[in-house]
Amino acid sequence: MGKAVLYIRDEELLESLKNRLRERGFAEIIASGSASELLSEALANHPEVAVVEFSAGDQEIVGAVKRLWDKLSLPIVMIAESCDLGDVQTWGESAVSTVLAKPVREEELVAALVLSIAAARRVERLKEEVSSLKESIESRKVIEKAKGRLMERDKLSEAEAFRRMQRLAMDRRISMRQLADAILLTESIAG
């Protein structure tokens, strides 16, 4: 595993967590002394996960965690005195991956870390897939528009216009999208 960033005020818990994380294969563990330090360390080091101790009423850490989520979409494991759902909701349901109540058992921590990191990776893959699908849809729209212009201008059937575009794209070794953009640009300049 890669890096983890911690914000734990309880020194005994902090040392215990650092040891546990090292034993579990984390290459680098960054301990932060304040909420603002947590945010700056995470932004500078791009960890895989954040482990944060929560105390009711600690608005500084609530704000830092929300900014951490907004900027890095980092999975966040919260360690709390109690698992009061109201407190967790103040963090924003999307910002916290897992909540563990003190005392933290090693098995629970490891499971929370592994599952949180895996879930974050799935979310990233889904974001990439959505982005790719959006690009495909946009390309398809441009290609259809260019095909329509060829059909109108050269009095071609839909199949003929598409075959012409395919041939031109292959001959010029460019993508259909690039060809469609060129056709539309030429049409806008000529028109």
Image (tube, rainbow, N blue to C red):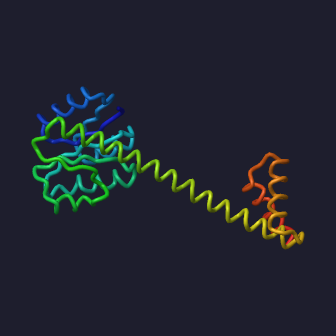
Q: In the current view of this chain or complex, which residue is farthest to the top?
A: 23
- Residue 126: percent from left, percent from top: 46, 52
Say if 34 sits above or below 26 in the image. Answer: below
Q: Which residue is drawn at 35% across and 47% down?
A: 119
Say if 17 sits above or below 187 in the image. Answer: above
Decide which of 185, 163 is in the foreground and name it. 163
Q: In which quarter of the image is the N terminus?
A: top left
Decide which of 53, 177 is in the foreground and name it. 177
Q: In the current view of this chain or complex, which residue is farthest to the right?
A: 154
Query: Viewed as shown, does residue 73 lie left or right of 144?
Result: left
- Residue 87: percent from left, percent from top: 17, 59
Query: Viewed as shown, does residue 99 lie left or right of 94?
Result: left
- Residue 130: percent from left, percent from top: 51, 56
- Residue 45: percent from left, percent from top: 38, 37
Q: Which residue is drawn at 89% across and 72% down?
A: 155
Q: Residue at x 15, y 32 (%)?
A: 16
Say if 33 sits above or below 178 in the image. Answer: above
Q: Quadrant of the C terminus?
A: bottom right
Query: Viewed as shown, does residue 170 lie left or right of 21?
Result: right
Count up the numbered dots: 0
Which quarter of the picture shows residue 186? bottom right
Q: Which residue is drawn at 89% across and 69% down?
A: 154
